[in-house]
Image (cartoon, grey):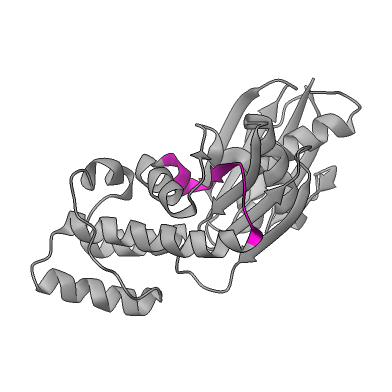
C-alpha cells in the first residue's frame, strides 16, 4: 500500500511515494511553462498499482484531475516537515518565487502563517538570477563562498540589485564576496519576514535553498533560533500531501 503526493510549485514539481514510514521513491522536474503537463508527468512516472490515494498540493494542484484530494501547500508543508522532524515548531520555506513562514503548535498543527508572493527578492529565483550575473553555478555555492567576506548588497529589488552587482564587479569586487553578500541579504530579509510570527523553538528550513549549508547557517544566525533541514527538505510539500493521503485512508504513521 502506497500513497502519492505531488507538489506543483512555481519553479519545480515534486512527487513522492510514501509507505507510511518513509519515502519509497521521489521525483523532481521543472514546472516550466506548462504546470499541467509537469504535474501529470510526475503522476504518470510515480503512479503504480500499489497507490491507493493521491493528494495534490501547490499552485498547480487543481490541474491534476486524477488526484483524490487537493490540499493547500501550507497544510502540506506543515505535515511533511513535521513528519521529517516532530520537534520543530516553525517552518521557513524559500521557494522559487515566494517565501512562507509557518508557526506550529505542539501537535504540529498550523497556528499562523505568512506568505510573500508579491516580489521575487528573497527567493530562489533571485539568487539564481544573481549567480547568473556572476557567471557561477548555484549548485557550487557552499564551496564558492568559503572564506569570503560578504559584500554589502543594499538593494533587494531584483532589478536594482542586478545594477548594484554589475557596479561591484566593475570595481573589481571578489565574486565570492558578492555571492555571500547576496546570501546574507536573502536570509536577512527572510528573517525579518518570518519573525513577524514570533517564532520559537526549532525551525525547519524547506525549499530548494535548504539544500545548501551556507543558507541554513546564515538564516540560523539571523533568526537566532536553531534551524534544521533534511535531505528531503525540498520534498516537504509533496511528502506532506502523501502523509495526508495515508491518514485519509485510515492508516496511521
Drawn side of residue 219 relative to residue 70, left or right: left
Is 210 within the magenta? yes
Is 225 within the magenta? no
Drawn side of residue 161 relative to residue 237, left or right: left
Could you say which is closer to the camera, residue 69 or residue 197?
Answer: 197
* 175 w.r.t. 200: above or below: below
Part of the protein shown in magenta: 197-211
Drawn side of residue 132 relative to residue 212, left or right: left
Could you say which is closer to the camera, residue 62 or residue 146?
Answer: 146
Q: Quarter holding the N terminus?
A: top right
Could you say which is closer to the camera, residue 245 or residue 32?
Answer: 245
Residue under the image location 69 percent in, 57 percent down: 60
Residue 74, position as x, y percentages in the image: 71, 52
Residue 2, position as x, y percentages in the image: 76, 24
Drawn side of residue 108 relative to residue 163, left or right: right
Residue under the image location 25 percent in, 76 percent down: 164
Residue 107, position as x, y percentages in the image: 79, 37
Residue 113, position as x, y percentages in the image: 70, 58
Q: Quarter holding the C terminus?
A: top right
Query: For residue 44, which quarter of the picture?
Result: top right
* 183 w.r.t. 116: above or below: above
Residue under the image location 32 percent in, 74 percent down: 154
Residue under the image location 66 percent in, 22 percent down: 22
| Residue 33 shows up from this direction | yes
* 229 w.r.t. 181: above or below: above
| Residue 53 shows up from this direction | no
Amino acid at each position: 500500500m502506497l500513497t502519492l503526493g505531488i507538489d506543483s510549485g512555481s519553479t519545480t514539481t515534486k512527487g513522492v511515494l510514501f509507505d507510511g514510514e518513509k519515502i519509497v521513491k521521489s521525483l523532481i522536474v521543472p514546472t516550466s511553462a506548462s504546470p499541467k503537463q509537469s504535474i501529470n508527468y510526475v503522476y504518470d512516472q510515480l503512479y503504480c498499482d500499489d497507490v491507493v490515494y493521491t493528494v495534490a498540493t501547490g499552485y498547480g494542484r487543481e490541474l491534476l484531475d486524477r488526484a483524490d484530494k487537493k490540499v493547500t501547500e501550507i497544510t502540506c508543508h506543515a505535515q511533511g516537515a513535521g513528519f521529517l522532524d516532530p520537534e520543530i515548531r516553525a517552518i521557513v520555506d524559500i521557494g522559487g518565487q515566494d517565501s512562507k513562514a509557518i508557526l506550529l503548535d505542539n501537535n504540529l498543527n498550523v497556528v499562523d502563517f505568512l506568505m510573500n508572493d508579491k516580489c521575487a527578492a528573497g527567493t530562489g529565483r533571485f539568487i539564481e538570477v544573481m549567480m547568473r550575473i556572476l557567471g557561477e553555478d548555484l549548485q557550487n555555492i557552499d564551496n564558492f563562498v568559503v572564506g569570503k567576506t560578504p559584500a554589502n548588497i543594499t538593494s533587494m529589488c531584483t532589478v536594482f540589485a542586478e545594477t548594484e552587482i554589475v557596479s561591484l564587479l566593475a570595481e573589481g569586487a571578489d565574486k565570492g564576496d558578492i555571492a555571500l553578500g547576496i546570501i546574507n541579504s536573502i536570509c536577512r530579509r527572510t528573517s525579518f519576514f518570518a519573525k513577524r510570527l514570533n517564532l520559537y523553538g526549532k525551525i525547519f528550513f524547506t525549499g530548494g535553498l535548504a539544500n545548501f549549508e551556507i543558507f541554513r547557517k546564515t538564516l540560523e544566525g539571523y533568526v537566532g533560533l536553531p534551524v534544521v533541514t533534511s535531505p528531503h527538505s525540498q520534498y516537504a510539500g509533496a511528502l506532506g500531501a502523501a502523509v495526508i493521503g495515508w491518514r485519509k485512508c485510515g492508516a496511521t504513521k
